[in-house]
Amino acid sequence: MRTTPLDQAKRLARHTEELVHRSLATLGATQSQRRIAADAQDYWHQPAGDRWRANSHWRDALVFQENDLWSAIGRDHLELFERGARMTGFTRSWDRIVDWGCGGGANAVAFAPRAEHYIGVDISGETLKECEREVADACATPFTPVSIDVDEPEAALRQITEPCDVFLSFYVFELIPTPEYGERLLRIAARLLAPGGLALIQIKYDPGSWRTRPRRRNYRSGLAEMTTYPIAAFWELAERCGLKPETVQLVPHNALDRHYAYFFLSKPGVV
């Protein structure tokens, strides 16, 4: 897609704003988790324009036009999961898949044909409908939408009543209000996975720069930079939440962003 002077000016303005908020956070001017969660709920619950659709990974967003990027997201993640499954000895069938933060279906269309039942969890009802449409176009696998609010992700446990074989979460943990909130999601994943099940969870890792720490303020303008983790810290957090880290793959940069880490986490217990 051609870059215009207006696009360049907007990019410079966003970069400047990011530096301002990073500086304020470094000085201690952060917001509470409750405030950030409320802002996140407001943002994702109300569809608003192309940037929102791009952040939600809807196929019709401009960033996915005239290229193969939308399809490549799911295709690449499926290949990554298959490699990780072989590496960790995960051989069970993928009967039930939970996709936490399913978005507009970029991953669902790749994984759902392998499942007997696909469960998509998201904050936005419109995005759940979009994901369901994409899955229906891709395969005959039944799709179950699960709607949650940011301040009560545990509500999903009342709607998903059977354990899953595979738990997926892509492009979600960098969007959550704080690193502490991530512990809640990991504990949910541990409860949803059947013994012997496998999770693939992607985060943004913090390589140690002040500009890559958790942002902790002004959600709407920097949602993809809200939460990061040092690699070892997330590994240890997953262990505390009842998951066994098997391996991690780092992707320093790709077509969407930078500093991605993909954790394969298994659920201990007798299969």
Image: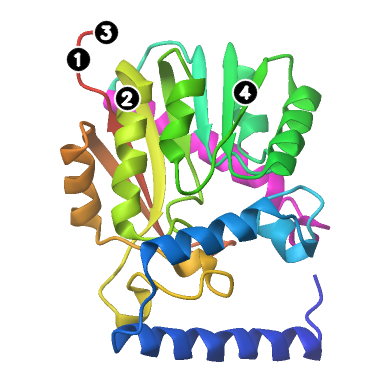
* Relative to 257, residue 80 above or below: above
In the shown orientation, is residue 118 left or right of residue 212? right
Label 2 belongs to which residue?
191
The quadrant the C terminus occupies is top left
Q: Nearer the viewer, mark 1 or mark 4?
A: 1
Query: Which mark, residue 271?
Result: 3
Q: Quadrant of residue 190?
A: top left
At label 1, counting other C-alpha atoms closer than 10 Å, the crowd grade (few under 14, some 14-19, many 20 or more) is few
The single residue placed furthest to the top in the displayed view is 271
Q: Nearer the viewer, residue 188 or 107?
A: 188
Does 142 sit left or right of 151 as displayed? right
What is the span of residues highlighted in magenta in the rendered image? 62-88
Q: Earlier in the sequence, mark 1 or mark 4?
A: 4
Whether label 3 touches label 1, CB < 8 Å: yes
Q: Position of residue 3 (x, y in %)?
A: 78, 80
Numbered disc 1: secondary structure:
loop
